[in-house]
C-alpha cells in the first residue's frame, strides 16, 4: 500500500495518489489506484472498474472487502 499527498489535479481532485494491491502467486488479484490520467479505479480478477473515492477509510474498507471476496471465489 502506498498513499501520499499531491497537488489536487483533474484526475486526483482529492489531493491523494494511492496504490493498493493484493498479489497471489505473482498475479494481481485486487488493486485500487489512480494512475496518471486514469483517475480512481479498481482491478478485480483481471478486470478494471471505475471507483468513486470518498475517503481513505472507505478505500481501505473497499480494498479489504474485495480481498475477502476474492478468497471466497
Image (cartoon, rainbow, N blue to C red):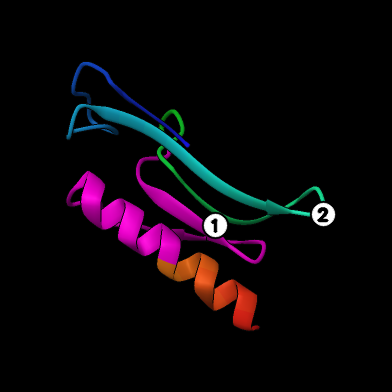
- Which residue appears at 17% of the width and 52% of the height? 54
**Residue 26, numbered circle:** none
x, y percentage for residue 22?
A: 60, 52
Q: Are marks 1 and 2 in contact (CB under 8 Å)?
A: no
> How many C-alpha atoms fall within 10 Å of the one at disc 2: few (<14), some, or many (≥20)?
few
x, y percentage for residue 56?
A: 24, 45
> How many C-alpha atoms fall within 10 Å of the one at disc 1: few (<14), some, or many (≥20)?
some
Q: Identify which residue, 67 or 38, lies in the foreground.
A: 67
> Which span is picked out in magenta?
38-64
Task: Give the labeled residue for mark 2.
Answer: 25
11, above or below 68, in the image: above
Q: Identify which residue, 37 or 21, lies in the foreground.
A: 21
Quarter of the image for residue 58 reads bottom left
Quarter of the image for residue 9 reads top left
- Which residue appears at 41% of the width and 31% of the height? 37
Q: Secondary structure at mark 1?
A: strand
x, y percentage for residue 48?
A: 54, 58
Q: Secondary structure at mark 2?
A: loop
Most extreme residue toward the top is 7
Position of 58 with respect to 21 (left or right) is left
Is 39 in the magenta? Answer: yes
Most extreme residue toward the right is 25
Task: Give the labeled residue for mark 1.
Answer: 43
Inter-mark Cα distance, 1 to 2:
16 Å
Q: Please report whichever mark, 1 or 2, sits nearer to the chain's N-terminal start.
A: 2
Position of 68 with respect to 45 (left or right) is left
Amino acid at each position: 500500500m502506498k498513499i501520499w499527498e499531491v497537488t489536487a489535479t483533474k484526475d486526483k481532485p482529492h489531493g491523494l495518489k494511492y496504490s493498493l494491491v493484493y498479489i497471489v502467486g505473482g498475479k494481481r488479484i485486487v488493486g485500487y489506484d489512480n494512475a496518471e490520467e486514469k483517475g480512481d479505479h479498481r482491478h478485480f480478477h483481471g478486470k478494471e472498474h471505475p471507483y468513486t473515492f470518498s475517503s481513505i477509510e472507505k478505500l481501505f474498507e473497499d480494498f479489504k472487502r474485495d480481498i475477502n471476496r476474492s478468497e471466497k471465489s
